[in-house]
Structure formats: structure tokens, C-alpha cells
Image (cartoon, rainbow, N blue to C red):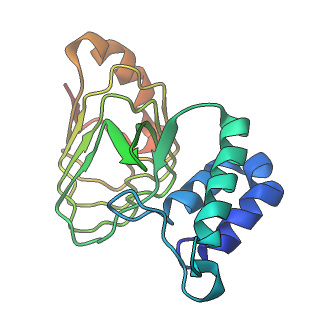
Amino acid sequence: WGGVWTRDVSYSTILSMAYMQPEAAMTSLLCKVNKKGEIIQDTGTGGAWPCSTDREIWVGAAWELYKVTGDKTVAVNGITSKKKTSIVVKDTIYIGGKSYKITVIDANAFKNCKKLKKATIGKNVTTIGKNAFYGDKKLKTITITSKSLKAVGKNAIKGIDKKAQIKVPKSRRSKYKKLFKKSNGYVSSMNLQ
């Protein structure tokens, strides 16, 4: 929902989305925060002086979402350019001066990034969603620094390079071998090390 007004995203979150689809609500609200961690102010009456009602409503929506989720975590939901050859999912992100752990790579987050060759996954990630890296045929190296990965979704790595190397913490190797299986795209020619 990144292409709609800040106030529309915020009102829908307040009215129902925070309760019905908290992950989608979080993703939508985060689309309304720029790289500096500032809430995006729409043009027109929502951005009028002396204070922006868009920003006020966004804060209200974030509070409503916090009441539902009760944590300080966020999900990565995509990439700004499908032309990138490498990506890093950081450990944390700062929004409005506050630190949030990145714990989820959303479904379809990096799907069909045809030029992607290398991905590094931060230490706080617990879930890699379905189709997260689906169709990234040049993806040869995935480095997972997280020691708390619990789930890898269906087709999460389907269609990546058949000889891909998946590097994991040594202490979690045997546990993570059980997470990567045929249903999420893992094939025997890949190397989990």
C-alpha cells in the first residue's frame, strides 16, 4: 500500500487493519516513513500548518498497531530496485529515533530479483516468508547470521542457483538443515554450511 495517502493507510489501520492484518498494517505504515525515519507528509490539507494531521493520524495508527502486536519488531517487505546484485537485511532499523529489530522477511520480499547474487540475513530474523527469494536464479550465496531462525516458508528459495551456498552459524547447522527442505526450494546440489 505504498502508493496511497499517509492518512488513508493510517485510518484503515486504526479502523480495522491493525486487528485483522497486523503484518500488512505494519508494512503499509512503514512505507510511509522515509529514509531519515520521518513520517511522510502528504500534500494538501493533511499537511497544513501549524501541524500535519497526516503525521498525527500515522502516530495514532502506529499506537493502535502496537496495542495489537505489543513489540518493537518490524518486517522487511521488499527492495527499492530489482536491479541490485546484493542485499543486506540489517539487525535493526531506526524509525523516528527508535530502534526496531528486524525479525521477519515477508512473503515475496525479494521475489524475482533476477540480478541478485548475494543475500545476508541479520541476526534477529526468525522467519523467512514464503516465496521470499523465489525465482532469484543468480542468487548463489545466502549468509544467515541469525541464531534464532525458526521458519522458512514454502518456496522461499525455489528457483535460486542450484549450487547455491547457504552459510549458517556453526552451532545451528544441524537445526537449520531441518528447516531447509524440498517444500521451500532446497535441492541436494545446494550446500548448507
Q: Which quadrant holds residue 136?
A: bottom left
Q: In the image, residue 49 lies at what x, y percent?
A: 57, 79
Q: Residue furthest right?
A: 15
Give the position of the C terminus as an image quadrant. top left
At 65% across and 70% down in the image, what residue appears?
53
Q: Taking the image as drawn, is residue 4 in sight?
A: no
Question: Quick one: 188 or 61, which is closer to the camera?
Answer: 61
125 lies above or below 162: above
42 lies above or below 149: below
At 75% across and 64% down in the image, what residue appears?
12
Question: Quick one: 14 or 116, which is closer to the camera?
Answer: 14
Q: Taking the image as drawn, is residue 44 in sight?
A: yes
Give the position of the N terminus as an image quadrant. bottom right
Question: Quick one: 55 or 87, which is closer to the camera?
Answer: 55
| Left or right, residue 31 beside residue 174 | right
Q: In the image, residue 151 lies at what x, y percent?
A: 50, 30
Q: In the image, residue 63 lies at what x, y percent?
A: 67, 45
Q: In the image, residue 56 lies at what x, y percent?
A: 63, 62
Q: Which quadrant holds residue 134?
A: bottom left
At 73% across and 38% down in the image, what residue appears?
68
Question: Quick one: 116 or 9, which is closer to the camera?
Answer: 9
54 lies above or below 93: below
At 22% across and 61% down in the image, what residue appears?
116
Q: How many marks?
A: 0
Q: Residue furthest front?
A: 50
2 lies above or below 70: below
| Left or right, residue 4 beside residue 114 | right
Q: Residue furthest bottom?
A: 44
